[in-house]
Image (cartoon, helix red, strand yellow):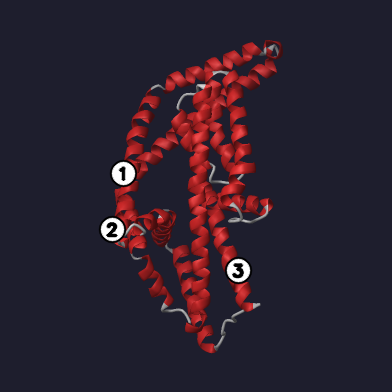
Amino acid sequence: MKKIDWNWSNLGRLAIALLIIGIIIFLLWKFPIFTEVLGVVIISFIISYSIRPFHKFFMERGLNRKLSALIVILSIILFVVIIFSILVPWIYNESSNFAEVIGEMKSYYERITGDIKYVTDSPFVKEVLYNSYERFKDALMVIVSNFLSKIVSIAENLLLLFIIPTLVYFFLSDGDSISKGIMKYMPFSNKYAIRRALNHMDKVMERYIITQFELCGIIGILTFIALKVSGIKYALILSLVNAVFNIIPYFGPVIGAIPIILIALLTSTKKAVIVIFWLFVIQQLEGDIICPKILGETVDSHPVTILLLLIIGGSIGGILGMIIVIPVWVMIKIVVGEIDYYLF
């Protein structure tokens, strides 16, 4: 076991580093513009780290770092453009037919009340069902309105859409140079420990990211097949939504299943029951077979710990916070493990 040399020089460097961190925290607290800038940098770094496996794929085939980074970013931009070219017309058509969807909801409400006439003879039950329908309709209108507003706000901020891909490109193409530049300011006697921790973190996170892509792909395909077999509309979109939300442990499958079940209910109660059954089967396959096989011991944390982390991440950053809190926790565990190795 190699001990870290805590001499006065290293303690001085540590004090300077803590002072710089304190200044950064003060600036973020006092001046919101710094928070926005830091947010853009962090988002760019997360994106670049997430697509590093693709970057390495091209580098392993003889392309240099800059060309590999350019190919990956252009491919992702092309993919996003294709997705939006499909989604935007679909959203427009569905928004124009929104009155029809509301009508289907009303028909569903009437069908449900017809199926349970012997219960709905009670005025209280009728009022509860009708109020539930009205609340659901209002909530759906708010969700659609907020979603369209988000798209408009993103489209308005074209500068941000340009800055993020540029930063991602530099993180990918000059990542080694940035890392070496940072290492120059590290205490010489501790460089081995820092480099070892970073290499360990890099390998674990790369494997985690790859497995998440694999997991999303498998869940998306299984969901698409289940919805197609069940005859549910918008199978492709709903499958993509469910696949993405499955990145979030425990809560993700529930969030991803909600729009699927709602669309199925608008078709028929029987189809909704069938869809719920298939989603349950997929969830069991994911929890008992797919996740243990793919993820292995990457996360290696107690379920209670994961739940607490998800609650904290959700309270801080919403859905995005719930997605990134687990990889952040994995990195913290690695750092703590390395500190424990070198100090004790």
Q: Residues within 10 Å of mark 1 (few under 14, many from 20)?
A: few
Name the front one of labels 2 and 3: 2
Amino acid type of the residue tagged 2 in the rendering: Leu
Q: Residues within 10 Å of mark 3 (few under 14, many from 20)?
A: few
**Percent coordinates x, y for residue 1 in the rendering:** 62, 79
Q: Are marks 2 and 3 in contact (CB under 8 Å)?
A: no
**Percent coordinates x, y for residue 255 in the rendering:** 56, 38
Amino acid type of the residue tagged 3 in the rendering: Val
**Percent coordinates x, y for residue 145 in the rendering:** 43, 33
Structural distance between the alpha carbons of marks 3 and 1: 40 Å
Specify whether 173 is left or right of 340.
left
Amino acid type of the residue tagged 1 in the rendering: Leu
In the picture of the structure, the residue carrying the numbered disc 3 is 336
**Percent coordinates x, y for residue 342 in the rendering:** 60, 77
Q: Label 1's element? A: helix
Q: Residues within 10 Å of mark 2 (few under 14, many from 20)?
A: some
Q: Nearer the viewer, residue 90 or 40?
A: 90
Q: Residue at x 52, y 31 (%)?
A: 259
Q: Nearer the viewer, residue 94 or 239?
A: 239
Q: Is residue 322 above or below residue 203?
A: above
In the picture of the structure, the residue carrying the numbered disc 2 is 67
Q: Label 3's element? A: helix
Dot label at residue 78: 1
Q: Residue at x 39, y 36 (%)?
A: 148
Structural distance between the alpha carbons of marks 2 and 1: 16 Å
> Tag 1 or tag 2, which sits nearer the N-term?
2
Quadrant of the image containing the C terminus: bottom right
> Tag 1 or tag 3, which sits nearer the N-term?
1
Specify whether 134 is left or right of 146.
right
Residue 40 visible in rendering: no
Q: Label 2's element? A: helix
